[in-house]
Amino acid sequence: MKFSFQAKSAEGEIREGRIEATNSEAAVAMLQERGLVPLMLEKETEIPSLIKDLQHIWDGVNLRELSVFYRQLATLIEAKVSIISALRAVGDQSDNLYLSTVIKEMVNDIEDGVTFSESMSKHPEVFATLAVSMVKAGELSGNLQRSVVFLADNTEKNYELNAKIRGALFYPGFVLSASVIIGFVVFTVVLPKLTGIFKDFNVAIPWYTKMFMFIGDFMSSFWWVVGIILLAIVGGFFYYIKTEDGRKEWDTIKMKIPVIGKLFQYVYLARFSENLAVLLDGGIPIVRALVIVSEVVDSTSYESVILRAADEVKTGGSMSTVFARSSQFPPIVSQMVKIGEDAGKISEVLNNMSRFYNQETDRVTRNLSTMLEPILITGLGLGVGVLVFAILMPIYNIAGQVQ
């Protein structure tokens, strides 16, 4: 168990800190062995792992909160505030309970003699490998503030990139979801009432109307079965893409979707060039930087190519040769990387690539809604037209016969 203490040294200096011991008597004995006279000793209450897990599920830590954390931390470090005091200040004002809990655990570890980067590595669900490596490089070079500023800038750019993707896909996602819900209600509630007219008049109806009548009757009687099947399909899809094989297959399919596939390609290239440039500027060796970037690019297709590039560089080759043989990287990327390698300015070239593909991502996201809107409207119009033709036309025929 851990204890917080306040003690007086032989010189009369008041010291505060933490100590780990089996009980309070052992803690006092350990302090006395260090030549300290205990003035205050309190047992620290540890947060149960279950509560911490629930905090993680409920709160989580998103990229916006991480960027604020890094930015505030860099400001305090620049002001010559110690890392422990800086972390405590940032943790106290954080609105995210889980992040505050993680920061407190990091402070405790650092007080026990663990480095800042090692304390971060104990929380991989919050801090990516890229962040840990950048902080470690800053610690070794004596310029931790610069590394944290790099992380703040990089996290903000990644957040903006993810926000662009969500914004671009929100409109088509909303329209398709609303269409499925409305279609479910129409076939379950509205359609059986309309088709009931045909049964009352006992008239001849075309085959396509009979098909809709059968679907409506089935949905009306077994709507819960259809609901379970839909939920099972959606749940099964998300479960499958979380598996290794499913993720690979989904990454391949995403890249083949018209328009949207191009958007994902630009996002992955921007993420690759931005993160690799940050790592290289932070003093990370190129092979290690490529391995780290392969983990954060968030695409199995690009991950395999980047890892092959790391192996090529490790044996004395160059990244550009691997990228030139890969369909994931456009020819201009391999050519620019080769120029950077030959000129010894790979980081500068990567920064230029990052700006270019960020601009392309902006352009595609701005035009995506405009391009998809007529397609969605046409698809919905065709669906409504078929339904109207199959149901209302026989009703008009019945009305003519009655007259």
Image (cartoon, grey):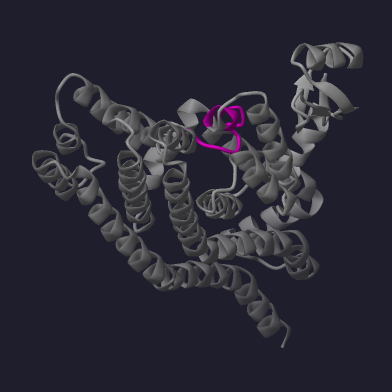
Quadrant in the rendering for residue 334? top left
Q: Is residue 154 left or right of residue 325?
A: right
Rendered view: 29 above or below 248: above
Q: Which of the 4 quarters of the picture holds residue 400?
A: bottom right
Quadrant where the N terminus sits is top right
Viewer-proximal residue among 390 and 273: 273
In the foreground, 362 or 282: 282
Q: Is residue 371 visible?
A: no
Reply yes or no: does residue 121 show up in magenta.
Answer: yes
Q: Residue at 12% of width from left, 41% of height from top? A: 338
Q: Hey, which quadrant is residue 359 in on the image?
A: bottom left
Farthest-out residue, front: 11
Residue 203 percent location from the top left of the image: 70, 68
In the current view of this chain or complex, which residue is farthest to the bottom?
403
Is residue 75 positioned above or below 7 on the image?
below
252 and 5: which one is in front?
5
Point out residue 367 in the picture as x, y percentages from the top left corner: 37, 70
Q: Residue at x 35, y 51 (%)?
A: 261
Task: Please tell me whether residue 383 belongs to the stretch shown in magenta.
Answer: no
Span of residues in magenta? 117-129
151 horizontally vs 273: left or right:
right
Residue at left 67%, top 76%?
395
State the image coordinates of residue 200 (x, y, percent, origin top left).
80, 68
Residue 22 in view here? yes
